[in-house]
Image: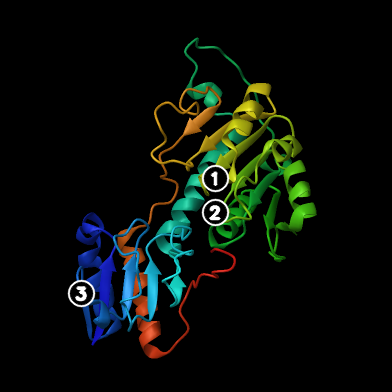
Amino acid sequence: MTNILFAAGPDLWAEYEAPLRTALDATGLDYQLAYEADPESVDYVVYAPGSWLQDFTPYTRLKAVLNLWAGVEKITGNPTLTVPLARMVDEEGLTQGMVEYVTGHVLRHHLGMDAYIANPEQAWRPVVPPLAGERPVGILGLGTLGLACAEALSALGFPVTGWSRSPKTVAGITTLHGSDGLSEALENAEILVLLLPDTPATRDLLDTERLAQLPRGAVIVNPGRGPLIVDDALIAALDSGQIAHATLDVFRTEPLPAEHPFWAHPKVTVTPHIASETRVPSASRVIAENIRRGEAGEPLLHLVDRAAGY
């Protein structure tokens, strides 16, 4: 019997219990799935940030922790967690949702749609945008989500430059890495998409100096992590015209406080962390497959590199 503890809160338990059982039934495993369990009996923990479970020491039989979200910054530093940790990579739901969000907002800014959507004076302004091939797009972060977005935008004709911390080769995409590569990626990006994880190496990455490296009038789309951008530096860049607009889906504090200047800034679009929600049915299948693999002695998918933080 494989014992699985769902340690992700009562509301999520109500959403996930039936889909998880369906996905686990399909694996043929003999399992027990529960919201409460004797720690010494638990083989796998299904986890979400903010869970009541913070001390893993009593879980002496534990084989792996399976995170429900892509972000793992709230658990990677837990010193009591010594077993493998897998993050959520859900290409059916999470990845496709991110591709749709990023593609939609890149096209919105590329086509200048805001001028027509908000046009109370009924002004006739026939401004023709360049074609996609004349609009360089930069993507910081070439993990599963960044790569999928880069390929989608490239397929639409945008010249895409992707930057990652380590070297990568992707057909049809200009790939850069390292500090010199970051400067080059920024200098060429008329639209910049941020899809990096929140780690000590990426926190405050877009500060005053790096925002100044972007072409004047560039647009930023951030569905990655809030701490990637220095808020005050971004506001100053928006006020000066260095940045034309910022579409932000993630923030240092969520929900974004009512008094935060992003809410009222005319050049900021705030979306409430909706860029890529985990879809329960497909995420349940990802969790079930990893448990099946663990019980079969196969390598787990989407393991987190604790040293890198993702």
* Residue shown at the point (34%, 56%) measured from the top left: 50
- The residue type indicated by label 2 comes to Asp
Q: What is the residue that sits farthest to the bottom in this orientation?
A: 297
The residue to which callout 3 is attached is 37
* Residue shown at the point (22%, 54%) measured from the top left: 11
Q: What is the residue that sits farthest to the top in this orientation?
A: 121
The residue to which callout 2 is attached is 198
Between the C-alphas of marks 3 and 1, the distance is 36 Å
At mark 3, the secondary structure is loop
At mark 2, the secondary structure is loop
Between the C-alphas of marks 2 and 3, the distance is 32 Å
* Residue shown at the point (73%, 30%) measured from the top left: 216
Q: Left or right: where does residue 136 sit relative to residue 15?
A: right
**Nearest to the observer: residue 66 or residue 143:** 66
The residue to which callout 1 is attached is 227
**Which quarter of the figure has residue 279?**
bottom left
Between the C-alphas of marks 1 and 2, the distance is 7 Å
Q: Position of residue 124 (x, y in %)?
A: 57, 14
**Which quarter of the figure has residue 51?**
bottom left
Q: How is the image coloured?
A: rainbow
* Residue shown at the point (67%, 47%) measured from the top left: 138
Whether residue 188 is visible to the viewer of this picture, yes or no, is: no
If you read the primary sequence from the N terminus, does the residue marked by circle 2 or circle 3 appear first? 3
